[in-house]
Image: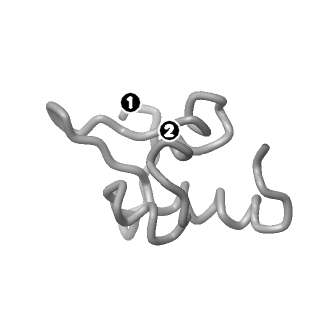
Amino acid sequence: MNAATQIAPDDRLLTLKQVREIVPKDKATIYRWIGKGIFPDRYRIGPGSVGWLRSEILAWVAENTRRPPS
């Protein structure tokens, strides 16, 4: 996370498992979408550890529920 990233006090980081509970796609699909720039990128939170902001995932779902990504 960079210093410019503003995180709401009630926001939290999600694991890949938690992201997949919200967006029921496999790991490969999620990472492919990240590579294409059509899914929120992960934040490195430690060696070999990443997380996604819950607010970014929910915003993505709201934007993409009517038109799935290609």
Q: CA distance from mark 1 to mark 2?
A: 21 Å
As drawn, is 66 to the left or to the right of 1? Answer: right
How far across and down, in percent of the image, does residue 36 sit? 65, 29
Farthest-out residue, left: 47
Q: What element does badge 1 sit on?
A: loop
Determine crowd level at label 1: few under 14, some 14-19, many 20+ residues with C-alpha closer than 10 A: few
Q: Residue at x 51, y 70 (%)?
A: 22
Identify the residue under disc 1: 2
> Residue 33 is drawn in which quadrant?
top right
Amino acid at circle 2:
Tyr
Q: Residue at x 50, y 38 (%)?
A: 31
> Residue 53 is drawn in which quadrant?
bottom left
* Quadrant position of the C terminus in the picture: top right
Q: Which mark is residue 31?
A: 2
How far across and down, in percent of the image, does residue 45 sit? 23, 39
Tell me if residue 21 comes above or below residue 43 in the rendering: below
The residue nearer to you, when weighing 45 against 20, is 20
* Quadrant position of the N terminus in the picture: top left
> Residue 37 is drawn in which quadrant?
top right
Q: Residue at x 64, y 61 (%)?
A: 59
Q: What element does badge 2 sit on?
A: helix
Cβ–Cβ below 8 Å for labels 1 and 2? Answer: no
Amino acid at circle 1:
Asn
How far across and down, in percent of the image, does residue 51 sit? 33, 48
Marked residue nearer the N-terminal end (1 or 2): 1
Q: Residue at x 54, y 66 (%)?
A: 24
Determine crowd level at label 2: few under 14, some 14-19, many 20+ residues with C-alpha closer than 10 A: some
Farthest-out residue, right: 67
As drawn, is 1 to the left or to the right of 64? Answer: left
The residue nearer to you, when weighing 55 against 63, is 63
